[in-house]
Image (cartoon, rainbow, N blue to C red):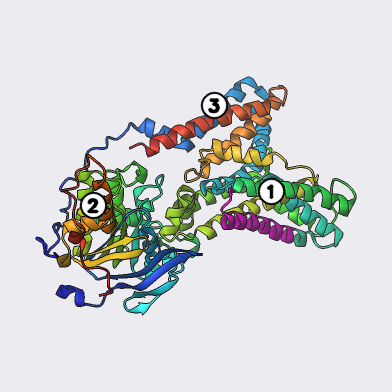
Amino acid sequence: MSVTQHAEPAVTAPPAPGPKETDGRTAQRPLALRLLARPEVGVFLGAVAVYVFFLVSAPPVRDGSSMANVLYQSSTIGIMALPVALLMVGGEFDLSSGVAVITSALTASMLAYQLSMNVWMGVLLALLVSLAIGFLNGWLVVKTGLPSFLITLGSFLILQGVNLAVTKLVTGNVATDDISDMDGFDQAKKVFASSFEVGGVQVKITIVYWLVFAALATWVLLRTKYGNWIFAVGGNKESARAVGVPVTFTKISLFMLVGFGAWFVGMHNLFSFNTVQSGEGVGQELIYISAAVIGGCLLTGGAGSAIGPVFGAFMFGMVQQGIVYAGWNPDWFKAFLGVMLLGAVLINLWVSRTATRR
Amino acid sequence: MTSNETGAPVVELKAAGKSYGNIRALHGVNLTVHAGKVTCVLGDNGAGKSTLIKIISGLHQHTEGEFLVDGGAVRFSTPREALDKGIATVYQDLAVVPLMPVWRNFFLGSETTKGPWPLRRLDIEGMKKTADRELREMGIVLDDLEQPIGTLSGGQRQCVAIARAVYFGARVLILDEPTAALGVKQSGVVLKYIAAARDRGLGVIFITHNPHHAYMVGDHFSVLRLGTMELNASRDEVSLEELTNHMAGGSELAALKHELSQVRGVDVEELPEAGDLVAPVASGE
């Protein structure tokens, strides 16, 4: 019964290399359309539109120092929006990023004050605490496989409570003590919260950090292995793992990067205001996430950029300050924010559909 | 046995099995993969095909029996280790990231870099050039390597995944149902790449539930049923008809035929007799 007609496999011919240079079946879309499909270009146009709008409707904006103010406002959002955006490209979110900023500032301030240490010791310990929080968030997300929304919602509530309770316990107050006369304060202030003069306008140093970090993040995202891995773990975690991408390392390190950002902004807050209000930071996480989404980062991960969130943060800073300069009720800010977010989400949806269309 | 199969196998499973807790997904599986040969693993849904490739590709570990690569016992804990041994898997979902460009997908997880450390960066030009060359060699010509891989057709994506595995020094290529979701013509294209990979000296493990596709390119056939091997035969020991019968249910089908013959209006004359279904049974050659 085991007699066969073919002793050799039927298919033997290796495929011949195609003679044509291109298969000619994919027509190039017009350049303008291809550019518009880039989320960064969309948000750039949006930022220009918002800028022009306030330039026209709020004359004080035209002043150089107002612009420096707008950029400062944008930079404090933007520095955090960058790691939040990278994390989002990597397919996760961090709802605790807003209160984590305050946690970091409180840690540095209270440790330095209570133990009468050089403030740099507090700064260093705060960095460790922030990285540890990021690590814990990432580790829990990776090990449990639960949505990061749930895990970080938990850490958000924990940190919010701990911030208030521990501050009250230690200082007997809702704010920390003024540390401006402590050793190392002036030095740290120079690093985290100084300003310099450009053409008669005081420019905050955070603007420089913001742009440097953005350039660095862009380079990492597009030109390094690690950047490739970020896109891969966000785009398809199982595929990434199957081809040998260290998924666990990539995800956890992204959460730790958010921790680093929280530390940096926390230190800025501490050294520009000398004290920290323990109840602050709630709601900021949504601003960071919104800036990343407006900047073209796909909420579900796998697509986005670092330059997009820069424009996203600028739009927020512009609107926030522009409303003040225009003399309107600042309550309008949140409404503006919502409109921009919805618009960006709709554009994002269209982009991802275009990209995956056959 | 043909003379080519007498060489040492690259991958060999000896009475291998896998249990998840008290559920035995796979038991007593013998499988040999030789360079330049296509070993087909057939089986219905739930027969243990996926478990088998997960063991070989390093996603899971076997819990009984032996798993040998080049004659030495191994136990992979990550897919990376399997890759380092030259065992590459093209999964059903192809392990591609749809939104990423073709060339980034091609090199994902094995990116090449240039420059000293702080400035070490992806060798984008080099990677694009290599990807283009490798794809052309497999007969795939793409207009734009920057297009997201999600925009390619199913057959094209499959071929990119195969070309990728071949380029990264795979000696054993595991293809998980590569033709399952494809049309007739695209399946033909994929079968050609399987033949091309075989002719380049790779050992191919071709997982499928289509005996016709398997018989087109296969040198050795293993049929899995409920986690054990039902058939383990080389090409000259089994005909396409027998293979189809085994796949279609074999002895179960004969029993079903008997039942159906009790029902009026069902013509069972054309169905095979139980006696026709006697074929070399897995016996650990």
Tell whether B240 sits left or right of A249: left
Gap between marks 3 and 2, in whole Å? 50 Å
Graded by Cα atoms within 10 Å as few (under 14), some (14 to 19) or many (20 or more), the crowding at tag 3 reads: few
- Is residue A3 something one can see in this rendering? yes
Tell which subunit mark 2 falls on. Answer: B
Q: Report the disc number at residue A154.
A: 1
Image position, residue A100 (x, y; %): 70, 49
Amino acid type, residue under disc 3 in the picture: Ala
Secondary structure at numbered mark 2: helix
Q: Are marks 3 and 2 on the same chain?
A: no
- Label 2 crowd (10 A; few <14 / some 14-19 / many >=20): many
Residue at the far bottom: name it: B72
Region rendered in magenta: A123-147
Look at mark 2 in the image and give the residue it sits on. B190
Q: Are marks 1 and 2 in contact (CB under 8 Å)?
A: no
* Cα separation between marks 1 and 2: 48 Å
**Three-letter code for the amino acid on which mark 2 is drawn:** Val
Q: Nearer the viewer, residue B183 or A351?
A: B183
At x 62%, y 56%, the residue is: A140
Q: Residue furthest top?
A: A57
Judge from the rendering whether residue A40 lies leftward or rightward of residue A124; answer left or right: left
What number is the disc on residue A49?
3
Secondary structure beneath dot 1 equals helix
- Decide whether residue A143 is among the magenta residues: yes
Does the segment drawn in magenta span residue B282? no
Residue B120 at x, y = what percent?
A: 45, 61
Task: Assign the N terminus of chain A to one quadrant of the image.
Answer: bottom left
What is the chief secondary structure element of the magenta stretch? Answer: helix
